[in-house]
Amino acid sequence: MPLAAAEPRPSARLADSRIALEFDDGLKSRVLFRSAATWIPLTDFDASESLHLAGGKTAGPFRYAGHRETRVRDVHGSGRRHQIVGNSEDGIEKTVTLTLYDRYPGFVIQRVIYRNTGKQALGVEGWGNSAHMLKETGRGFWSWNGSSHEDRHDWVLPVKPGFNQANFMGMNGADYGGGTPIVDVWRPDAGIAVGHVELTPKLVSLPLVGTDRGAAVAVDMDDKQTLAPGAQLATFETFLTVHNGDFFRTLETYQKLMTDRGLGSPKRQAGSYESIWCAWGYGREVSVDEVRGAMPKAAELGLKWTVLDDGWQKAIGDWTPIAKKYPAGDADMKALVKTIKDAGMRPRLWIAPLAAAPGSDLLHDHSDMLLRGPWGEPQMVSFWNSLTLCPAYGPTVEWIKQVMTRIIGDWGFDGVKIDGQHLNGVAPCHNPDHRHARPTDSVEGLQNFWKAVYDTVHAINPNAVVEICPCGDSYAYHNFPYMDQAPASDPMTSFQVRLKGKSLKALMGPAAPFAGDHVELSDGGDDFASTVGIGAIVSTKFTWPGEGHGESTNVRLTPEKEAVWRKWIKIYGDKMLPLGRYRGELYDMGFDKPEAHAIEKDGRLYYAFYATEWNGPIELRGLTGRCTVHDYVEGRDLGTVSPTNPRLNVSFRRALLIEAIPTGASA
């Protein structure tokens, strides 16, 4: 009987308490994950880092030449830096630098430098980092994808053979692009994720490919250049991480690490957690009388914000009141603001910056603001039949500051709802009037545009709320420091409300002010449970006493609906779960059935379970003592649980929302 092949002996190994990377003699590497006391090989030895040369060639093969380890200390704390060096016969030196920080076990930051040691210039097409295939175990894969797409499909998807998503961080449609530069794929026992940790957006791809052997990830960058003799190319700082559970730990660690680097979410505004009524139920044809008529009902139900949505403005780009609705212009707008405040509510105004409609005064007078492609073509904003402005052009920035000063300072609004899929990411700008150093200045400068908006608004009103709604895009992390509230952004299903909520609670912090968006967009148009249960802010666009216009004719608050709305708005106000700590590490959104979420607040754990129909056991994870379980929606006790006996048998349809009350505490 033949002997089994010996395990290959690595030339270099680096590890912390959760991850190990091993490099063989050809600088291929494999990833291992520590589970309990066992190291599990998640991948085989893959050609993980590569330099793509002209003519479809790949540099190499490389031969291992050395490994050096040093201690480091920087904004991330203390850690160890490893440099692994190899050389190729075609005259390229490759140095893979990997840093592991004590504060972030399992998370490796990487940069690769290629130096041309030959005598001939090399044509380079691009590079790739952290190309690995998570091995198949027969139990399948789930994934989290940070890219944006015009069909607005789920960010969380199962991965089967044939799955192939490029996850390009640039424009994947005329006005859909940008995102959070992470792709994560996991099995029931472990997962792997890659991305980049640069402080500005980069036009990388994060391909995820499903095969019979496993699920492959990578960081790929097109970077055409000529590498002269003696010159070097350095990749961006990318990362590789391993984890158990779903994507939550990856996103949470990424958020903490980026916050170390100065790119975190701002201090929370109290008003960011207040419930919302939006006039969008009436559509663009909304009248001032309709707003004034519905607002008292919204206030009576306990809602705190009135949002004046699309339809108040002269044109997209001309952010002045339309004369047929506001004949007195600024005076009418100020009067409406006063009416809202007199009703005990706070006024917020809808606006779609960076877009200008054909025929608008802005486009006529300032066509120089347009973002243009390599042939001079403008970038379309399809939903409003408008054109995109360049966020990295000085006059565009100064113009939006003036607009915000008028809205917040002159008219007296307490917040802005910034809306549109085009605001999440933009294409490279080739407009010669802008004199960009590089076309990608527009891509990397978008976050500075939002900083100008945020700073202007808060300089006038420190308690104002800046909401950014990228209309179905996967939120661009680099914009997070400049918004106070993030909505579910036009969810197409209740599942999207929940997956976006879990994502944003990781990327903005466990008490993120995430709104479930208009409940009318949820399954059945009434799924408050998917908002309240995950710790999201309640929002609605009902019309009252009459119907809306056109497509918005099915959201009238009937007496039957009013009873439901009143009940859930009160539950939201009583529990205020967004202020709690979302415990996203406790449940796996892909593999756990039924789907489950947990929030810790005021010494209690609040659980939410979701399924079309469920009859069987549920497990209450994270308990620290014996608790009574209370269904706070239906007002009934379900039994007792403890850390050693955390299961209950239950039956429910759609959702079950419960709280675990420590024994001895009052209900």
Image (cartoon, grey):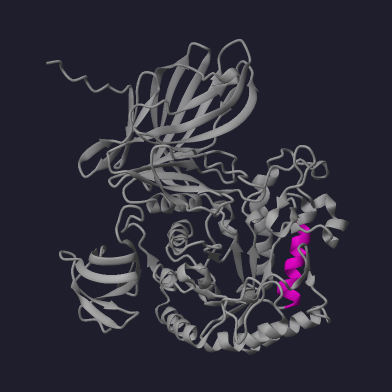
* Residue 302 position (above or below residue 119): below
Q: Is residue 129 visible?
A: yes
Q: Residue 570 versus residue 519: which sits nearer the camera? A: 519
- What's the residue at 45%, 57% (across, down)? 503
**What is the magenta range?**
397-411
- Quarter holding the C terminus is bottom left
- In reply to whether residue 578 is colored magenta, the answer given is no
Answer left or right for 369 relative to 465.
right
Which residue occupies the extreme left position in the image? Answer: 1
Q: Is residue 606 visible?
A: no
Answer left or right for 425 relative to 167.
right
Residue 600 occupies quadrant: bottom left
**Residue 586 picture location, percent across and down:** 31, 59
Answer left or right for 179 relative to 450.
left
* Residue 272 position (above or below residue 157): below
Principal secondary structure, stretch drawn in magenta? helix
Q: Residue 275 versus residue 568: which sits nearer the camera? A: 568
Q: Residue 548 versus residue 506: which sits nearer the camera? A: 548
**Residue 146 picture location, percent across and down:** 50, 48
**Residue 21 picture location, percent across and down:** 34, 32
Residue 81 occupies quadrant: top left
